[in-house]
C-alpha cells in the first residue's frame, strides 16, 4: 500500500470523466487500498480515484472513524438509481478543495448500485451523511466538484480563498 498525493483544484485532471472498471481484479483492489491509505493520511472521509489522478470509477469511504474503529468501504462503478424529491442541506468539504466548507443542497435520500471489492453487485439505500458523501464522490467521477453546486459568486469566492491558501502554503 502507498500514500499517493491528492490533486488540488484547479488541477484540470479533476475535471476528467472517469471510465468504468471492466474487471475487479488485484490491480483495482490495490488501487482501492492505496486510496484508503491516502484518505486516512489526509484525514478525509471519502476519496475518488481521480483525486489521486486515476480516472477510474472507484470510490472509498469511511464514515465511522470518529468512533475510533475503521470501517472502510469500497464502491466500484457506483450508480445512483433513485433520488428523493426531498432535499437536504449539508456542509461539505473536499480533500481536493482544502480548507473550504460550504453548504450544498442535494436529494436527501438516494438508492445506489455498485460493485464491492470482490466484484459483487450491491444495492444500498442511503440518507444523511452517507447519502451526501456518496453523491459528492460520484460527482467526482463526472468531473464535478462540490463548489460547482454553489452560485457563481460563492464559487468564485471559494476558489479565490483556496488559491490564496495554496499560495501561502507554498510560500511557507
Ligand atoms: Zn471531494
Image (cartoon, grey):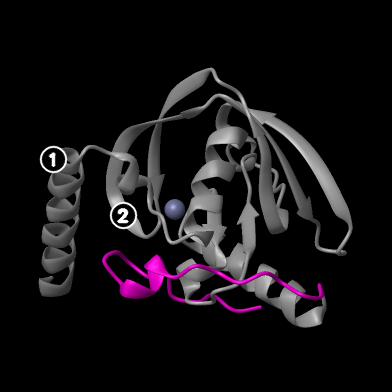
**Where's the N terminus, which quadrant?**
bottom right
Q: Could you tell whether 12 is left or right of 27 in the image?
A: left
Q: Residues within 10 Å of mark 2 (few under 14, many from 20)?
A: some
Q: x and y percent of residue 8 in the render?
A: 32, 66
Q: x and y percent of residue 167 in the render?
A: 12, 67
Label 2 sits on a secondary structure element that is strand
Asked whether residue 27 is in view, the answer is yes
Q: Which residues are magenta?
A: 1-24
**Where's the C terminus, which quadrant?**
bottom left
Within the magenta stretch, is there residue 53?
no
Mark 1 C-beta closer than 8 Å to ligand 1: no
Within the magenta stretch, is there residue 15?
yes
Name the mark on residue 7.
none
**Eye-nearest disc, 2 or 1:** 1
Asked whether disc 2 touches disc 1, contact meaning CB atoms under 8 Å apart, the reply is no
Asked whether residue 44 is in view, the answer is no
Mark 2 C-beta closer than 8 Å to ligand 1: no
Say which residue appears at 32% left-offset and 48% top-offset.
148
Q: Could you tell whether 148 is left or right of 170 in the image?
A: right
Q: Which residue is mark 2?
A: 98
Of the image marks 2 and 1, the number of the one nearer the N terminus = 2
Q: x and y percent of residue 15 in the render?
A: 38, 66
| Between 30 and 48, the one nearer to me in the picture | 48
Q: x and y percent of residue 31 in the render?
A: 66, 75
Q: Which residue is mark 1?
A: 153
Amino acid at each position: 500500500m502507498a500514500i499517493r498525493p491528492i490533486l488540488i483544484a484547479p488541477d484540470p485532471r479533476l475535471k476528467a470523466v472517469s471510465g468504468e472498471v471492466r474487471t475487479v481484479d488485484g490491480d483495482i483492489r490495490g488501487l482501492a487500498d492505496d486510496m484508503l491509505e491516502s484518505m486516512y493520511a489526509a484525514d478525509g472521509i471519502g476519496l475518488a480515484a481521480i483525486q489521486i489522478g486515476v480516472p477510474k470509477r472507484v470510490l472509498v469511504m469511511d464514515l465511522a472513524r470518529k468512533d475510533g474503529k475503521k470501517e472502510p468501504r469500497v464502491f466500484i462503478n457506483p450508480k445512483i438509481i433513485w433520488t428523493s424529491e426531498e432535499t437536504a442541506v449539508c456542509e461539505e468539504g473536499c480533500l481536493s478543495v482544502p480548507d473550504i466548507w460550504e453548504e450544498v443542497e442535494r436529494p436527501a435520500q438516494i438508492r445506489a448500485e455498485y460493485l464491492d471489492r470482490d466484484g459483487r453487485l450491491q444495492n444500498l439505500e442511503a440518507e444523511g451523511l452517507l447519502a451526501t458523501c456518496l453523491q459528492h464522490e460520484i460527482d467526482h467521477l463526472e468531473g464535478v466538484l462540490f463548489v460547482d453546486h454553489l452560485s457563481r459568486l460563492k464559487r468564485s469566492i471559494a476558489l479565490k480563498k483556496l488559491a490564496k491558501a495554496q499560495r501561502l502554503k507554498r510560500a511557507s
